[in-house]
Image (spheres, helix red, strand yellow):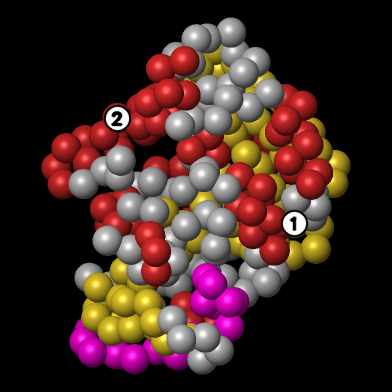
Amino acid sequence: MLPRGFAGRLTLIGMNIGHKSIYSKVAKVLELRPEDDLLEVGCGNGYFLKKFASHVHSVAGLDLSELSVKMAKEKHRDRIRAETAEFVQGEASQLPWEDGKFSVVITMGSFIAFPKPLESLKEMRRVLRPGGRVLVSIEWNAEDGLDHTREVKGYGMWLWTEDDVRAVMKEAGFSDISITYGKGLKMPKLMIASAVK
Amino acid sequence: MKRELMDILACPMCKGPLQLEVTEEDENEVITGSLKCTQCPETYPINDAIPNLLPPDLRD
């Protein structure tokens, strides 16, 4: 269910707190450069992009939820005015950008809910320039030792193994696939997969 | 939505170029309008300065 109204705003802010500790680990893997054009698929309220924005040339975010895009736009008002940030409502497996517009594409925490993970990764690859980097962080996964039966049944969450992630990224056309692990709040083994176009 | 976004956006369905039609605009951005694909029959709304580029079957 997509976040809406005041309760939706609280949910999105609550998600930020849960994901706070992930930021430094992801930043280390990403090694952002000043010339990077960074896209986050499933950007929520723009929390991570706000942190990354000062390290790159431009940021862009896409989210299914209108409220998320609205909150992200509020958070990035100055950068939008300066034309170094942009936010659109859209879906991961049908991205609304021309080919090769970004040097880095990330998705953090949303991949387990993507209805079409392979198509989404193919789209993320399409909008990357040659040599561009992709990063997928998978907070809950089959390697973390937790019981996710409720989430799998309730939300249709995908329970990714490391092998499955490598396979789907390879099938999407990525190379140099690398997987590392971090820790977050209630996320004992947060999977971070990165690769190159 | 900033007009400059038109330089890089594409139709999510067919990846064709989009054509902007403005209904309301302030000094910063397009507030209301639409993005019409020049290659396929789809049109995407812009409301509250947010371009809704969801595939049509996922729109509310």
Q: Is residue A66 on the magenta stretch?
A: no
Q: Residue at x 34, y 57 (%)?
A: A69
Q: Is residue A124 left or right of residue A42?
A: right
The reply, left or right, for residue A26 in relation to residue A151 is right
Residue B27 visible in the current orientation? no
Question: Is residue A33 toward the left or the right of residue B56 in the image?
Answer: right
Residue nearest the viewer, comparing B53 with A149: A149
Secondary structure under the numbered disc 2 in the rendered image: helix
Query: Would you name the residue on which mark 2 appears?
Result: A14
Residue type at the position of mark 2 = Gly
Residue A176 percent across, percent down from the top left: 85, 42
Decide if residue A157 is on the left or right side of residue A56: left
Q: Residue furthest left?
A: A6
Residue at 31% x, 69% y is B50
In the depicted structure, whether residue B60 falls above or below residue A4: below
Q: Chain of mark 2?
A: A
Task: Say if B30 sits above or below A85 in the image.
Answer: below
Instruction: Looking at this view, name the residue that lies furthest to the right.
Output: A176
Residue B55 in percent (x, y) is at 44, 66
- Return the mark for residue A85: none
Q: Are marks 2 and 1 on the same chain?
A: yes
Instruction: Give the magenta range.
Output: B9-27
Q: CA distance from mark 2 to mark 1?
A: 31 Å
Q: Earlier in the sequence, mark 2 or mark 1?
A: 2
Dot 1 amino acid type: Gly
Give the residue number, with chain letter if any, for mark 1: A132
Q: Residues within 10 Å of mark 2 (few under 14, many from 20)?
A: few
Residue A117: x and y in percent read 61, 45
